[in-house]
Image (spheres, grey):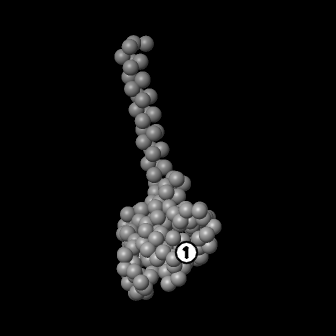
């Protein structure tokens, strides 16, 4: 065989390998799971987003990213108005759907700092409860929902660890819903 024929065969093999790789990448991304979420903060005494909400947002991002899930979110919003809440969720869902996201998670974090020793801190004791709803954006069906009340904050040596563990537990529950 001539050198030219051998080089041609090598180039053809390289092109086949690259083509197979490109097709595999396209198929993998087409089958990738994607999740978008939005956290709404309910609270009468504060109009700013609490640090704990940002910590929970980070915890959700980290959890899903570590599971190989494409994740996005809308900014955390403070509202107590039910109609405004619905508008915010609908807008976020529409944006996620237009972006090709498969699942949307609505999270509502309710605060009660009336008896808190440090109402401004990112403490688990300041969170009354967190509720969530997972929606399949292709079918608009609610796949599952849940509610979690934080455990006693004194179970944690560091306040930040309590919020991180709380958000991790919620992420696990949401993950179970989307993996069914």
Report if residue 33 is visible in the image. no
In percent of width and height, residue 155 lies at 63, 67
Of 113 and 31, which appears nearest the observer? 113
Q: How busy is the neighbourhood of tag 1: few (under 14 within 10 Å), some, or many (20 plus)?
A: many
Residue depicted at 45% across the width and 52% down the height: 29
**Quarter of the image where the C terminus is located:** bottom right
In percent of width and height, residue 91 lies at 37, 75
Left or right relative to 98: residue 149: right
Q: Is residue 58 above or below residue 151?
A: above
Of 135 and 63, which appears nearest the observer? 63
Report if residue 113 is visible in the image. yes
Task: Label 1: state its secondary structure.
Answer: helix
In percent of width and height, residue 135 lies at 50, 72
**Quarter of the image where the N terminus is located:** top left
Residue depicted at 44% across the width and 74% down the height: 120
Left or right relative to 71: residue 146: right
Of 179 and 38, which appears nearest the observer? 38
In the image as oriented, which residue stretches furthest toward the front?
117
Q: Which residue is mark 1?
A: 125
In percent of width and height, residue 83 lies at 40, 87
Residue depicted at 44% across the width and 82% down the height: 43
Residue depicted at 45% across the width and 34% down the height: 17
Of 127 and 13, which appears nearest the observer? 127
Q: Is residue 179 above or below residue 13?
A: below
Q: Is residue 28 above or below residue 38?
A: above
């Amino acid at each position: 065989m001539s050198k030219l024929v051998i080089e041609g065969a090598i180039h053809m093999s390289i092109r086949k390998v690259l083509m197979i790789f490109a097709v595999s990448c396209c198929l993998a991304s087409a089958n990738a799971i994607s999740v978008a979420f939005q956290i709404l903060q309910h609270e009468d005494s504060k109009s700013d987003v609490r640090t704990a909400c940002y910590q929970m947002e980070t915890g959700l991002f980290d959890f899903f990213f570590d599971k190989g899930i494409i994740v996005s979110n809308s900014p955390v919003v403070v509202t107590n108005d039910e109609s405004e809440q619905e508008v915010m969720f609908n807008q976020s869902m529409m944006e996620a759907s237009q972006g090709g996201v498969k699942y949307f998670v609505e999270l509502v974090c309710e605060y009660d700092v009336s008896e808190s020793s440090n109402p401004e801190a990112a403490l688990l004791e300041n969170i009354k409860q967190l509720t969530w709803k997972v929606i399949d954006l292709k079918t608009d069906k609610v796949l599952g929902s849940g509610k979690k009340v934080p455990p006693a904050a004194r179970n944690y040596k560091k306040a930040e660890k309590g919020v991180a563990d709380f958000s991790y537990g919620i992420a696990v529950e949401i993950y179970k819903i989307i993996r069914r």
